[in-house]
Each structure stands twice: as structure tokens, then as C-alpha cells.
Image: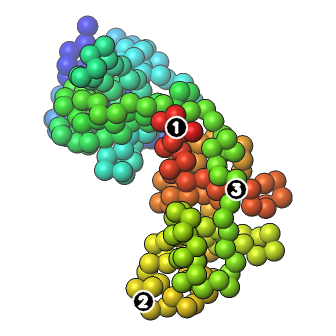
Amino acid sequence: MLTSVQKEILQTLINLYRNSNGKSIKGEEIAAIMNRNPGTIRNQMQSLRSLGLVKGVPGPRGGYKPTIKAYHQLNISSTGRETAVPIYRGGERIDDLSVAKIEFTSIPDPGECEAAIKLVGSIKKLDLGDRVRIGPTPVNKLIVDGVVVGRDDMDNIILLDTTAIRSIPKRTVEEVATHELVTLTPDISVKDAAVKLSSLGIEGAPIVEDDEVKGIVTLSDITASIAEGTENLPVSEIMSKNIITVKPETMISDAIEIMNKHNIGRLIVTDSEGKLAGIITRTDILDSIAGLD
């Protein structure tokens, strides 16, 4: 039975080793993270070595490495082939921190659902009260939103008071995208484009010429142009030319990641020949998740 200090040392060693590209970890590195005396770490390492949980590496570049038994002891996968499940705070992904296990502790109670999240990495990056998002997980594409209400540094577990639990459907962009598109020509004026988009109740449209997508314009672009008094310019002057496209067979979970990466709300769908085949928006995806389409 490991002591709390031994568990914390072992967890810290594994966290550091996962990001070291196979290099051994020095006791001083562990001591600095744990805010403990290096001598204490060395003494505890002797016990961990005798238990077969740690192996020492001699020499000037030496240090310590966790054994397979160490991963099993802490119930962590040791294959190195698992897909990293991300954790976000304030919309920003937390580097060097991923999810190893999600366990719902009170899901039968609809008014009070908590989740215990076992993490790989230093959970000291998280504080009580932080609003976080877990996922999506690789298979079921599960996403969990919640507030951190507990933190167990010894077992590397945080406790979430969940605010939302949802699973992204295993559907392709082609199944969700809009295929009957409204398009604009490059020479249409900003003013006329505003009238057209507003009358149809849509937020944006691709700019197409000779079956080729030249750009995309949104109501935000148009509003900014009108505010600057340039509503008589052709939309080609204000459109975004940095077009992000996806193929029809792209999974919507991947489409979400692309939108988040580029901070955009819509993607152009193109066929195998690069021609316009549709458009998918955040609203389309949300409706799919909610089962509204």
C-alpha cells in the first residue's frame, strides 16, 4: 500500500516522463513540482524501486523512469498509443493535461450529477470554481461541461459538478450540411448583398464565380462595411478569402475541431473535384446534437 507522498511522487514522475520523449527524470525536477526537498524524493525513490515501480538510470543524464507496474498501480494506460482526450478552461485547451478516465458518481439523480475525472498531467493547473469542458472522447464523442468542486492531488482526480453532458452523433458533414445554397457573385454590392441575406434570414453566403468559390461574406462583414460608408463596394472587396473547406465524408466531430481551431462559424463543403457542394454551420451541428434535424 503506497503512502500519499509515494503516490504523488509516482504520479509526478509519470506526468513528466510522458512529456520527456523517453528521457529519464531527475529527482530535482520532481522535487521542484512537488515543492519538496530533493533528499526526501531520493529516499522515497529507494522504496519505490524496491517495489518495482521505478527504475534508476545511472550516469550524468540519469534519473528515474516509471515501470509498467507503476502505470498499473495508478490505473493509467502505459501503451502510449491512446488518443489524448482534451480539457478546456475558458475555451482554451490546457496544455500537457489530458483525461484518462471519466466516472459519473451520481448520474441517477437528475438534479445533481457529479463526475470524477482522472487526469494525466499536473492537476495543480486547475482550481476550485474553474469552468471546464472535457472531450470529445475518441469513441463516443462525449463532451462534459462542469465546474471543478474538488481536487485530489494524490490520485490526480478532479470532481466536477456537471452542467451539460452530450454526445456528438456519428454523422458526416454531408448528412448535416445545407446543400440548397444561396450564393453571391463577386460584383454584387454590399448593400444588395445585405438586402438578400436579410430577406432570406441567413448569416452569410459563399461568393461564387464560374463554379469556383472565391470567398465568403457574413452579415458581420456587411455591417462593418455599412458602418464605414462603403456599402456600394462589391462584396469581393470585403469578403474573406481565407476559405476553410471540408469534404462531405468529414465527421461532424472533426468539423467542430476545425471551426474551433480557426475560430469560425461555418465551413464550405467541396466535392472530390473541389466544387461547391454545401455549407455547414455551428447551428447545423447544434441542431444535429439536439436531434432537431
Disc 2 versus disc 3: nearer the observer = 3
User: Quick check: marks 1 and 3 in contact, CB under 8 Å?
Assistant: no
Camera-nearest residue between 64 and 220 = 220
Q: Secondary structure at mark 3?
A: loop
Q: Secondary structure at mark 1?
A: loop
Disc 1 residue type (three-letter): Leu
Disc sitting over residue 148 in the figure: none
Badge 2 or badge 3: first in the primary sequence:
3
Quickly name the residue at label 1: 292
Q: Residue visible at 68% across and 60% down?
A: 181
Farthest residue toward the front? 199
The image quadrant of residue 184 is: bottom right
* CA–CA distance in space, label 2 to label 1: 38 Å
Question: Residue 283, how many percent across, how many down?
Answer: 50, 50
Disc sitting over residue 180 in the figure: 3
* CA–CA distance in space, label 2 to label 3: 32 Å
Q: Residue visible at 59% across and 42% down?
A: 252
Disc 3 residue type (three-letter): Glu
The quarter of the picture where the C terminus appears is top right
Question: Residue 205, how many percent across, how many down?
Answer: 61, 67
Q: Residue visible at 31% across and 50% down?
A: 90
Camera-nearest residue between 152 and 132 = 132
